[in-house]
Amino acid sequence: MPVTTRSKRKADDAPAAEPAALPSTKRSRKPKAEKDGAEADKKEEVQKEKAATNGAATGEETAVPSVGDVINLDGFGGEIELNDGAKTTLKELVDKSKSGVVIFTYPKASTPGCTRQACLFRDNHSSLTSTSGFSIYGLSADSPKANTTFQTKQKLPYPLLCDTKTTLLTALGLKKPGGKGAARGVFVVDKTGKVLALELGSPEGTVKVVQGIVEKLGGGESKEEDVEDSKEEKKEEKKEDSKEEKKEDSKEEKKDGEEEKKEEKKEEEAKTNGEKKEGGEEKKEQK
């Protein structure tokens, strides 16, 4: 009986294997509501950070307040120090005052122009505060130690504020252009946050600005010759003040340069002495 054989199926006749599925390259999209919520949270965080120092710490430019503006004192200008090292804020200073605060700014403690300005506020302290209810403070970028020495030496009857990070100075627009310190000026704000004065000026000019405000608040008529400088006088004072500040800056730069040279000389001497010592020890070992 004939035997029938089944032909083997060739390998190439077998059905081709399906290719493995490639991983999807499409990114999973978050729901629109979730995305919008995340963006809103991010914006809120930036706004909070910006409000902490009126934009000074974040590097964002914010409008400097003008006379007549009512500022939000919460977080304005960030945290500063009193010359005794205690931390404080502009809001705390205003809250503690009877009617508001006067803050005069100066470039550097214990320098001629700044000493004159501080002593003018010292000599007029009673007349500026007794009827107005204002609290007076000096403000600079100096350290608490430098300002304490300044306060003690000149017998100043008011505290000095130390804004080493220049957050409050920046917020007020009273930071020295191109520098790290303060420009000379004056800032007056009442209990509601209303700005009564904010301007640059000479040592005498800054005091006269406050005298004018005190007289107006007292209901009296301020005499023009006693309160306001003439345009020529203001120009002269600014010139003198500018000259003094340049001299002070020049002295500081010269002093820093001399100190650097001394340090370099010490390092060179130490290096030379070290080499001599090593040479002497080598000779001893050879012997």
Image (tube, grey):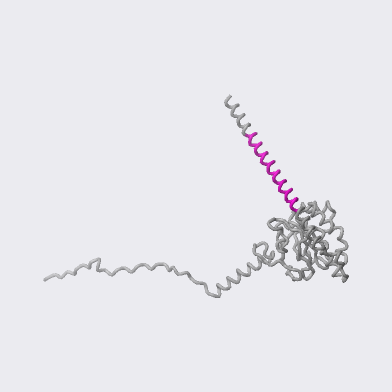
The front one of 59 and 25 is: 59
Q: Residue at x 72, y 68 (%)?
A: 65
Residue 90 position, x and y percent, is 75, 64
The front one of 209 and 217 is: 209
When asked about the image quadrant of residue 188, the answer is bottom right
Q: Is residue 132 shown to the viewer in this render?
A: no
Q: Residue at x 33, y 69 (%)?
A: 18
Q: Main secondary structure of the magenta part?
A: helix
When asked about the image quadrant of residue 106, the answer is bottom right
- Left or right? Give the position of 12 relative to 190: left
Q: The C terminus lies in which quarter of the figure?
A: top right
**Is 261 one of the magenta-colored residues?**
yes
Q: Is residue 219 shown to the viewer in this render?
A: yes
Residue 24 position, x and y percent, is 43, 69
- Image: 62 above or below 165: below
Q: Residue at x 85, y 69 (%)?
A: 216
Residue at the farthest left position: 1
**Is 132 one of the magenta-colored residues?**
no
Q: Which residues are magenta?
A: 245-274
Residue at the farthest front position: 232
Residue at the farthest top position: 287
Residue 275 position, x and y percent, is 62, 33
- Image: 162 above or below 39: above
When asked about the image quadrant of residue 52, the answer is bottom right
Q: The N terminus lies in which quarter of the figure?
A: bottom left
- Image: 116 above or below 102: above
The front one of 278 and 238 is: 238
